[in-house]
Image (cartoon, coloured by chain):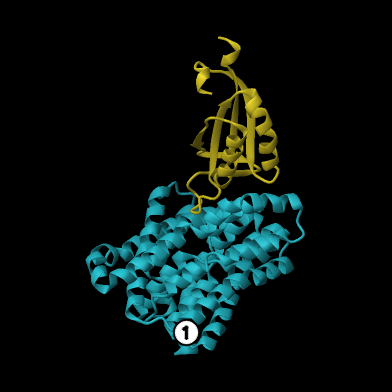
Amino acid sequence: MTDDNKKLRLELIIESPALRRAEDLLRDAGATGWTVVPAMSGFGGQTRWSRGTDISEATDMVVLICIADEDVLEPALKTILSMLDRRIGVVNVSDVRVLRPGLF
Amino acid sequence: MNALDTLLSPVVLFFALGLCAALLRSPMSVPQSFAKGLAIYLMMAIGLKGGVEMSKTAIDGQVFAVFGAATILSFGMPLIAYAALRFTSGLSKTDAAATAGHYGSISIVTFVAAIEALRIAGVPSSGYLVAVAAIMETPAIITALWLAMRGSKKSDADEVARDKGELAREVLLNASIVVLLGALVIGAVAGAEGYERLSPFFTAPFQGILCLFMLDMGLNAGRGLRRGWRKLGVAPILFGIYMPLIGASIAAVCCILIGLQPGDMALLMVLSASASYIAVPAAMRLALPESDPSVYLTLSLGVTFPFNIALGIPLYIAAASMLAG
């Protein structure tokens, strides 16, 4: 594996109404792709939550996963962090190695 | 139809069943996408019926007066709700504003239940009230945002401004508005003859599907209460009961001034008394993410919705019959 295979993996757990905003930030930063999956249930802030219990779906959580080069994700992280100032969410970044670097 | 008949109607009893099941921690659930489909069916059904009724009658000045009153009610009710919450409860400015927005907007399921109660009671109502329901969905959100943003940090206001496209889409093109208004127009275009062909799908199964949806609403209300009651004190819970009565009373005064018939008056009272739990929560999570959903969802769905379904609707119908009869 070469340095080209090394990427950053962003994982953002966020309320579904804020998803589009997060996607816009990633797109503006130059990310070429990401995946969103539904979060089923969890516990945080002394509250247990689970998908499908709120008819408005306003409190449903989603997980956004984005793998990109460091120079793409690092600037986006600042704006994502400022977005989370007012919102519920968990964000983490990890180093990963991809098998097909040309896709990212 | 008296209050006991309403309380013992299958619609209310299925709601009570769902509520009890959730409070007893039953694992029973209605799949979310199925419940969403049921909600769309109910909105299509009342939209179509409203459109057919509208096609039979001319739109006159009284209708426009009701549209105007509904808009003012939706803009104005959050101001009263906000003042009441800030004065009586310890809710923060943001939570009070977000909650107030719910009480200016409407609950379409309460409206559907009221139409059904009027039908069973043999009290006629006009089809254009469906359009009134759609009109009242949105203005309250604008008032709630204004209340929350007064004196707030510039960065917060900037963030709301950044989300305005998404917010506008959520507020103006949510499923309730699109389906209600769309079905209303389709019903008006199709007329009675066109509706007759759809009748086997929209008339006979309507009651059963409403019961099924009410079961899910009971489950939602019960879960909301179970999760959120600890965060609510006595004052917010009382607010969830007296605020619908204030809303209905103000709507009744408007209806008397306009000269509406009892059925239409009862429906406008129901709309004004009901609180949103679909369109407004989504807008509030987007624009006021620091507001606590367990406060406004518990109040609108866990307190006000059951109150209106069990006691409010028969009360508003009786009051309208007395005032306009």
How many numbered marks, from 0 up?
1
Nearest to the observer: residue B219 or residue B44 = B44
Query: Which residue is depicted at the point 62% across and 33% down?
Result: A29
Query: Which residue is depicted at the point 28% across and 72% down?
Result: B191
| Screen quadrant of the N terminus of chain B | bottom left
Nearest to the observer: residue A75 or residue B105 = A75
Chain under label 1? B
Where is residue A85 drawn, in percent x and y?
70, 43
Above/below status of A64 relative to A88: above
Q: Quick check: can you spot residue A25?
A: yes
Query: Dot 1, crowdedness within 10 Å: few (<14), some or many (≥20)?
Result: few
Query: Which residue is depicted at the point 49% across and 74% down?
Result: B270
Tell me, by letter, which chain the rendering colours cyan.
B
| Screen quadrant of the C terminus of chain B | bottom left
Q: Which residue is label 1 attached to? A: B62
Above/below status of B268 relative to B226: below
Where is residue B60 drawn, in percent x and y?
43, 84
Q: Quick check: can you spot residue B285?
A: no
Where is residue A25 drawn, in percent x and y?
61, 38
Above/below status of A98 relative to B279: above
Query: Which residue is depicted at the point 76% across and 53% down?
Result: B153
Tell me, by letter, which chain the rendering colours yellow.
A
Where is residue B78 drawn, in percent x and y?
63, 68
User: Along the horizontal axis of the image, is B232 left or right of B207?
Assistant: right
Amino acid residing under circle 1: Gln
Above/below status of B93 relative to B162: below
User: Along the horizontal axis of the image, is B57 left or right of B292?
Assistant: left
Nearest to the observer: residue B177 or residue B26 = B177
Looking at the rendered structure, the secondary structure element under dot 1 is helix
